[in-house]
């Protein structure tokens, strides 16, 4: 029998590519519909009409929007993200360090979240219906239904104000020692961990419970296997695909979480840069940051889909 | 879903039984709805009036929830904040669900190319992270209440569409829809009188969930300073302007956070504990 997996994956990648094109279209046109003349904004009020006309020609502003869109996309591929309106620096330089910082934050959160959330999710499914399971379920519903900044506020209240373990806001960026590292990253990572792990616990619990409802697990129960053995030996290997899917999908909540967390904790990442860009209406900066975020988001979602395809033995 | 136990049959017969958690969360939701509705009659002070000489004052008689960063009465500000948070979210969720459900049912009934195109476009819209979408719109056109309502509803149309389309596709295969088709009924009758009544329960439950998402996103945007603009303030904006009180645990920053949490958690719990008859209407 011929495998359908390659064609399915190819189809999924193609959809992602089409979506990315539509998204970049949307990003570009949403930000170019703005009132106001870009050349005028760049040169300031006192610019001569000749200078404005010259810059307009140099920036291709006179040409139709579709052509400008193509120039912009072309620039993206060559690593040229344009020039920031606010401080005349190339966006690439502004973004480089910030992106690394955000990736560090996301990476650390992932390292903490994945083992924690999977343990909680799988054990909750293992002892489904017990008090433990109910506490985990209610706690995750609580965390999911609360905005990220409320979680951050509560985390600061508990760890910084009452327990006094950590500073409330990380203004120092001395990461030369372990304690320094802890100080800068602790609060943001704690908050993000809450946001992401609530989703991950919920999805992985659901994934394991779904396999627990299959006939072969019932068979294992009937032959007298213990509960942990039934879950770990019989159910879990088959739930690995859905669980990996859940992990990738819940990591996409990092995108929204990071925007809030970087703002509240003053973390010098790319989301903070973008929020600042919105208040100064720095369009090239916003466009580039938006594209980076959409790309990351699509990457995670597509990975989740591909993992789901790969792990489904019926498609092989 | 079929239950064969005697108690199950009993519960199914009485139909609309609701448990304690559902009841409590229902009253919390009702409480906030009434607060939002009658805000001008229950607020003890005017929203802008400075009534306390101190800022970030503690809770005490007369200023039951303390004062904010300018010495204004926090209780009145939270009461009026309810208007913006609940009002904007309600308007946005109504537009989002109406549009999404009508499009979803239409796609399910018409099928073919219409379904293809609408589904693809809305899927693409769905793959822009919601907060990012909000940020971009605010950057492009500035923030005002109508813009916020419209943006929030656009963001949540794809979800409502997908959900109602999936339900409507199931109903569409049933005989009575076929009969109506053969009778020569037009699209508005098909979606309004044949399909909608059969998916109404789950659609309303979905509307509640989407309401929670919208409250979360609106509060998040306001917290970033990109949502409701001063002099108006919703709960997210209240947290933002009083964030300076966080190091000394001022009620001014805790109370609006708790207000958001109680509203969203109780809507979620209410939907989770709705009587089966409402939730599973299409399953029967």
Image (spheres, rainbow, N blue to C red):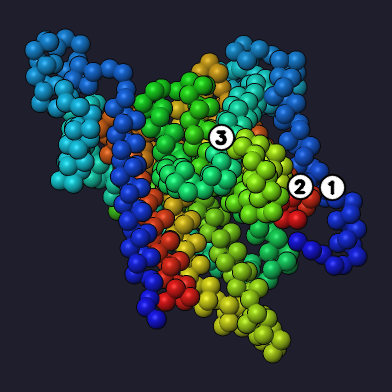
Residue beneath label 3, please? B99
Tag 2 or tag 3, which sits nearer the N-term?
Answer: 3
Residue drawn at x 28%, y 50% is: A100
Q: Are marks 3 and 2 on the same chain?
A: yes
Observer able to see residue B83: yes
Q: Are marks 1 and 3 in contact (CB under 8 Å)?
A: no
Density class for disc 2 (Cα within 10 Å; few <14, some 14-19, many ≥20) is some
Residue beneath label 1, please? B16
- Based on the displayed image, in which of its 4 quarters is residue B97 positioned? top right
Q: Return the residue nearer the eye: A288 or B16.
A: B16
Of the residues tagged 1 and 3, which is closer to the observer? Answer: 3
Residue A220, above or below B103: below
Q: Quadrant of the C terminus of chain A?
A: bottom left
Q: Are marks 2 and 1 on the same chain?
A: yes
Q: Are marks 2 and 1 in contact (CB under 8 Å)?
A: yes
Marker disc for residue B278: 2
* Inter-mark Cα distance, 3 to 2: 22 Å
Which percent across, then down, holds residue A156? 53, 43
Judged from the image, the secondary structure of the residue bearing numbered disc 2 is: helix
Q: Chain letter for mark 2, please.
A: B
Judged from the image, the secondary structure of the residue bearing numbered disc 3 is: helix
Which percent across, then down, holds residue B173? 63, 54
Judged from the image, the secondary structure of the residue bearing numbered disc 1 is: loop
Residue drawn at x 62%, y 82% is: A216
Tag 1 or tag 2, which sits nearer the N-term?
Answer: 1
Observer able to see residue A289: no
Q: Chain letter for mark 1, please.
A: B
Density class for disc 1 (Cα within 10 Å; few <14, some 14-19, many ≥20) is few
Residue B264, above or below A201: above
């Amino acid at each position: 029998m011929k495998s359908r997996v390659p064609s399915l994956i190819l189809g999924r990648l193609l959809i992602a590519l089409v979506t990315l094109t539509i998204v970049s279209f949307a990003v570009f046109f949403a930000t170019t519909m703005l009132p106001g003349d870009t050349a005028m904004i760049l040169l300031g009020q006192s610019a001569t009409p000749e200078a404005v006309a010259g810059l307009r020609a140099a920036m291709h502003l006179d040409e139709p929007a579709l052509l400008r869109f193509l120039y912009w996309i072309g620039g993206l591929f060559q690593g040229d993200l344009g020039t920031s309106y606010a401080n005349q620096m190339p966006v690439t330089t502004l973004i480089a360090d910030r992106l690394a910082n955000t990736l560090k934050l996301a990476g650390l959160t992932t390292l903490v979240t994945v083992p924690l959330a999977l343990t909680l999710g799988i054990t909750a499914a293992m002892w489904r219906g017990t008090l433990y399971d109910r506490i985990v379920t209610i706690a995750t519903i609580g965390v999911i239904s609360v905005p990220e900044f409320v979680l951050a506020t509560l985390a600061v209240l508990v760890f910084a104000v009452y327990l006094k373990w950590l500073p409330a806001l990380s203004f120092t960026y001395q990461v030369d020692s372990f304690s320094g590292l802890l100080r800068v990253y602790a609060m943001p990572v704690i908050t993000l961990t809450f946001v992401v792990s609530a989703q991950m616990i919920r999805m992985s619990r659901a994934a394991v419970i779904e396999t627990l409802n299959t006939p072969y697990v019932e068979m294992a129960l009937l032959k007298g296997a213990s509960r942990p053995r039934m879950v770990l030996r019989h159910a879990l290997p088959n739930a690995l695909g859905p669980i990996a899917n859940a992990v990738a999908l819940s990591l996409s909540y990092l995108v929204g979480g990071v925007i809030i967390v970087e703002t509240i904790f003053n973390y010098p990442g790319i989301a903070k840069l973008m929020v600042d860009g919105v208040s100064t209406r720095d369009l090239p900066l916003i466009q580039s940051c938006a594209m980076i975020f959409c790309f990351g988001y699509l990457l995670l979602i597509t990975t989740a889909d591909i993992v789901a395809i790969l792990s489904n033995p019926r498609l092989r | 879903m079929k239950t064969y136990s005697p108690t199950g049959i009993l519960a199914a017969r009485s139909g609309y039984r609701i448990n304690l958690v559902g009841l409590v969360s229902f009253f919390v939701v009702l409480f906030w709805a009434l607060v939002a509705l009658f805000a001008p009659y229950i607020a003890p002070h005017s929203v802008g009036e400075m009534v306390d000489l101190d800022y970030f004052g503690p809770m005490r008689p007369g200023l039951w929830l303390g004062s904010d960063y300018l010495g204004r009465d926090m209780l009145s500000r939270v009461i009026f904040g309810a208007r913006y948070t609940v009002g904007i979210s309600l308007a946005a969720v109504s537009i989002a669900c109406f549009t999404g459900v009508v499009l979803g049912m239409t796609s399910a009934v018409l099928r073919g190319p219409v379904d293809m195109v609408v589904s693809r476009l809305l899927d693409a819209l769905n793959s822009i992270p919601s907060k990012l979408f909000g940020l971009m719109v605010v950057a492009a056109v500035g923030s005002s209440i109508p813009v916020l309502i419209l943006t929030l509803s656009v963001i949540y149309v794809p979800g409502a569409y997908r959900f109602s389309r999936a339900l409507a596709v199931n109903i569409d295969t049933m005989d009575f829809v076929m009969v109506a088709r053969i009778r020569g009924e037009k699209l508005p009758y098909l979606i309004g009188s044949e399909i909608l009544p059969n998916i109404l329960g789950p659609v309303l439950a979905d509307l509640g969930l989407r309401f929670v998402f919208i409250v979360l996103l609106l509060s998040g945007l306001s917290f970033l300073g990109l949502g409701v603009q001063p002099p108006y303030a919703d709960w997210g904006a209240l947290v933002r302007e009083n964030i300076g009180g966080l190091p000394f645990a001022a009620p001014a920053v805790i109370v609006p956070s708790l207000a958001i949490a109680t509203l969203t958690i109780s809507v979620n719990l209410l939907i989770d504990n709705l009587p089966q008859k409402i939730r599973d209407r299409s399953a029967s």
